[in-house]
Every structure is written in C-alpha cells, then in structure tokens.
Amino acid sequence: MTYKETTDWLFSQLPMFQNQGASAYKNNLSNIILLDDYLNNPHTQFKTIHVAGTNGKGSTSSLLASVLQEAGYKVGLYTSPHLKDYRERIRVNGNVISEDYVVDFVKKHKSFFEEYQLSFFEMSVGLAFDYFANVKVDVAIIEVGLGGRLDATNIITPLVSVITNIGLDHTQFLGDTLDKIAFEKGGIIKKNIPVVIGEYVTETKSVFDELAKKQNSKIMYAQDEFFDVIPSALLGDYQIANKKTVLSTLNCLTGDFVVSNSAIEKGFLNVILNTGLLGRWQILNSAPKVVCDTAHNSHGLNIVLNQIEKENFTNLHIVLGVVNDKDLDSILPLFPENAIYYFCKPNVSRGLDVEILRMKALQYNLLGEVYSSVRDAYDGAFSSADQSDFIYIGGSTFVVAEII
C-alpha cells in the first residue's frame, strides 16, 4: 500500500473518534495491552511524561517537548488529533514520522490488527511507542487521547503525570460532573509517581487529593505556584496557566534531566518551530486581524472569547462550525450577540449540519448566514470585513484544520 492507501485504511476501516465519535470509544485497556505485548513492550524502552486534561494538553505537551529539545535531549511527542496529516501525531525533535515507517508498520502488523479488531487509536499508540523505542528517544511526551483511566496511552509508567485542568467535555464517556471527569482523568496517577495539576476547583481538588493519597503520589498544584513570566510563541491567554503547569512539571524532573533557564526561555519562544504546534490563538492576518483557535468546549471557549473582548476592532466576524456531539447549550451562550456569524460544517462525518447550528444559534440571538464549506464561510467573512475589523475562526479543531 502507498502512504495514502495506508492512512485511508486506518481512517476508514477501524473506529476513529476523530470521525465517528462515540462508537470509537473503548472502555478497557485489554486491546492495547495485547498489542503492546505483541510488539515486545516498546513502551518500557524509553522514559515518558504523561499529559491529560480537558484543555491545554497539546500546548503543555508541546512546550515540554520544546524545552527538553532545547536542553539537548532527543524528544518524542505523541499528540492528537492531527490537523492536516496523520504523521503530525508522532514526532521526534519536531520531525514527523516518515511515511515509509507508517506504511511498513501497518503492512507488517495488519493481519494482527484485523484479527483482534484494534481501534484506530490503539494502532496509533502502538505505532508511536514502537517508533520511539526504535529511534531511541531520551524521553517521550505522551498526550492522552480521551479521559485517562481507560485511554490506550495509560499503560505507561511516566516520570511524572500531568493533568492540565478539568472542564465539561465528552460527558457521554467521562461523566456529567467535574468530579466524575476528574476521577477519569486522574486515572493516569500512578503509584509513587508525582503528579502536577495545572488548574483546579473545589470539586476536582478533593478527587485529585484522594487519588494521589491512594497512590502515594506527591501532588503539586501549579496554579498555587509563582513563576517569573516567560515569553512564548503561544499567545493565547490560556497559555498563562499552561506555562505554569510546564514549569511545575520541569521542577519534578530535576533528578532526570538537566534543564537550564536558557533552555526554558528558548523552548517557550521556539515551541512552534520545534514542535509544529498550530491552531492556538494563531494569527493568520493583521488587517483585518484574523485569529483561529481550536478551543471547542465551554472551558476553552470562555477564555478565548474573553480574549477577543480585549481586542480593539470595529466589527467582529465569527466563522463557526462544530461537531454533532457538541453540547450547544453549554457553548453558544458564551458567544457575543454583537457579532456577524458565518455558519459552516467541518468536512468530517461528525460535522453538525450547518442549518441545525444556525437555528440553534438563533435561539441565543447569534445571527448570520449559512455557508456550504468552512473555506466559503471564511472567504465571506474576509470579503465583508474592513481592515479595522476582527475575524475569529473556531468552534472545532476540524474547522481550524480547513483554514490553516
């Protein structure tokens, strides 16, 4: 198979949360344990840092990887979902895995995948662990796909576990309250392994304290720590908390890695260059100012929309599309009424029908036109906007992926 045929097979033949949503979710670790044993347990051959949380996982993982790269280490980075190319998920020192490695891995193990009906995510985790072991990384930053306790990445025993924050998202899998979601994400806390919590509220802190006590894990709360402000290429207001989480995590690694202040400063400034991270308060144009952001739940969107309020502009244009399992009643009230909306459907099977989105938005006095694609919606906004206006593109990772 060619690379395209290989990725098409990965995407279409097996469950993939990115496209299918709920039906792709596995509720136990038996398959990934089976696969890892079959691959000779590659996850035991390199050090790891495990990152979970509702929002900020990608930014936190990328900042950690960038800093450790600047410190001179060979760093693996596993993230999801991808925006353009499947290989974005698996990087070493910022370089994506080769097409040949992906093709050869699937070709070699395809019969095993089919025999045991492995999910898309299980195969991807197996590929990442196999690759990181093969190229002998010094450390790999492993981002949780969904939740934590039952996530396929949760077979690792990391140097430190990191949970960025807890918000209401994927409630159909993780529970409909903050404490239930905290329990699921807190499932990455391992016996005698330190854990860093980025942000907490009363309901989640008690859960984390109890889990850490049960596992005899030292627990640190980054939001209670004080650090000097370090500039970063990541410009969103939510990066303030992410940077504190990263600095707290680095403090846990002093016995394993030598990281200078210079490496931290360079790592923060070069994070996009070093890791390829995109879609986080990413400025696409200056006049009119155009910003896209992958925030897609109430916790993340609230921060982004507050940041937009701080901008100086004449008119606000919002290009908005979402997926069909999104709780619109939790996010649409956050959006401003005094904006012009350009409604669209992201080009994935989970994309919410644009007319449904427009009608639901109407209930919250969010008014605008319907467009046949994300690109058409953006083109409509751009052609309507004056140089002093502001255009925001978001609502879903998949909307952003079609623009950048």
Image (tube, grey):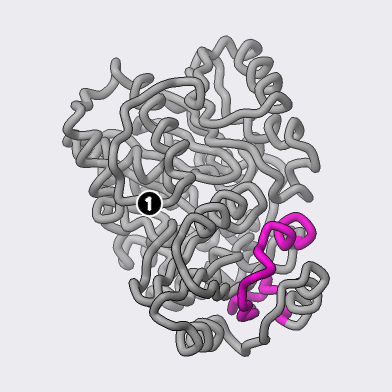
Q: Is residue 122 above or below residue 75?
A: below
Which image quadrant for residue 165?
top right
Q: Is residue 273 left or right of residue 400?
A: left
**Residue 215: image x %, image y %?**
60, 14
**Residue 209: image x %, image y %?**
64, 16
Q: Is residue 345 left or right of residue 374?
A: right
Residue closer to the observer: 281 or 153: 281
Residue closer to the observer: 96 or 109: 96
Q: SS for tag 1? A: loop
Q: Magenta stretch: give its range.
A: 328-354
Which image quadrant for residue 386?
bottom left
- Does residue 42 show up? no
The residue located at (37%, 56%) in the rendering is 277
The residue located at (43%, 61%) in the rendering is 279
Instruction: Give the quadrant of the C terminus.
Output: bottom left
Q: Residues within 10 Å of mark 1 (few under 14, many from 20)?
A: few
- Does residue 130 show up? yes
Residue 177 belongs to magenta span = no
Q: Is residue 334 left or right of residue 252?
A: right
The residue located at (62%, 89%) in the rendering is 372
**Residue 83: image x %, image y %?**
46, 66
Q: Is residue 369 above or below residue 281?
A: below
Q: Which residue is mark 1?
A: 235
Q: Is residue 168 left or right of residue 388?
A: right
Instruction: Give the quadrant of the N terminus.
Output: bottom left
Residue closer to the observer: 59 or 309: 309
Residue 350 belongs to magenta span = yes
